[in-house]
Image (cartoon, rainbow, N blue to C red):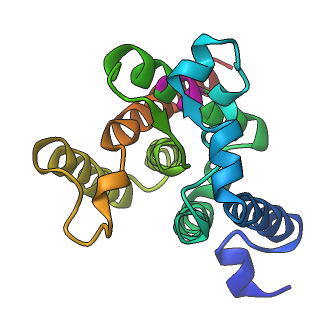
Amino acid sequence: MNPLAKSLNCDGRNGRALLLAGVALLLLGVPAAFMRAHFAYDRTALLHGELWRWVTAHLVHLDVAHAALNVLGLALVWALYFRAWSSREWLVVIVAGMLAIDAGLWWWQPQLQWYVGASGLLHGLLIAGVVGQWRNERGIAFVVGALFVAKLAWEWRNGALPFAGESAHVVLPAHRYGAAGGAIASVVLTLRRKWL
């Protein structure tokens, strides 16, 4: 067994699952125009009953480069925090993140007509990882959490980070909503673990 792969949570089944998730996100980025037309968060389409878009919007991307950035983000969160929660608990975090983003965009960003990408969801996964890490490594969790909150505060006040690339397409409120969903889910899961 490769100790580096194990330390990055990429050994055995974990590595295969990450590879599968990464390849799936990249493949969904290839026919980007088609995917956006049929699977993006689109306010008008949602009003006309295309409800699958609530889920699929988080899986499709602007293009392959956008998908690749999200795959790198997923790999980073996976390497740092995969073992913080069980697979079922991560599923709860994912669903909570999606719900928070969808509700936030729908109710508090009514001017937003469309959205694609996994960056909001990745923010939820990251904060859930930090909350999970808090149980065993509070010092590191505090530093990472503080940096993460500073990033969100910067985005709220100043817009995208200077090195964020083409920021015209970044829907920054999705980052906040995803982080809120991940935080709420992970705190509830932590309390559930204590009660059980």
Q: Residue at x 43, y 29 (%)?
A: 113
Task: Work out whether 34 lies above or below 131.
Answer: below
Task: Work out whether 172 lies above or below 180.
Answer: below
Tell me if residue 136 is in the magenta stretch. Answer: no
The foreground one among 189 and 158 is 158
Q: Residue at x 63, y 36 (%)?
A: 94
The image quadrant where one finds the C terminus is top right
Task: Work out whether 58 lies above or below 70.
Answer: above
Locate residue 130 relative to residue 165 in the image: left or right: right
Q: How many marks?
A: 0
Q: Which residue is drawn at 68% across and 86% down?
A: 4
The foreground one among 173 and 125 is 173
Q: Can residue 196 be spotted in the picture?
A: yes
* Residue extending farthest left: 157
Q: Residue at x 41, y 25 (%)?
A: 105
Locate residue 171 relative to residue 146 in the image: left or right: right
The image quadrant where one finds the N terminus is bottom right
Measured from the top left, where is residue 142 in percent x and y?
30, 52
Measured from the top left, where is residue 90 in percent x and y?
67, 40
Q: Can residue 59 be spotted in the picture?
A: no
The foreground one among 124 and 80 is 124
Measured from the top left, where is residue 177 in percent x and y?
40, 31
Magenta residues?
96-100
Locate residue 32 relative to residue 161 in the image: left or right: right
Measured from the top left, where is residue 129 in percent x and y?
52, 49
- Assign the magenta stretch its main secondary structure: helix
Find residue 83 and report its image quarter. bottom right
Locate residue 65 relative to residue 6 in the image: left or right: left
Tell me if residue 99 is in the magenta stretch. Answer: yes
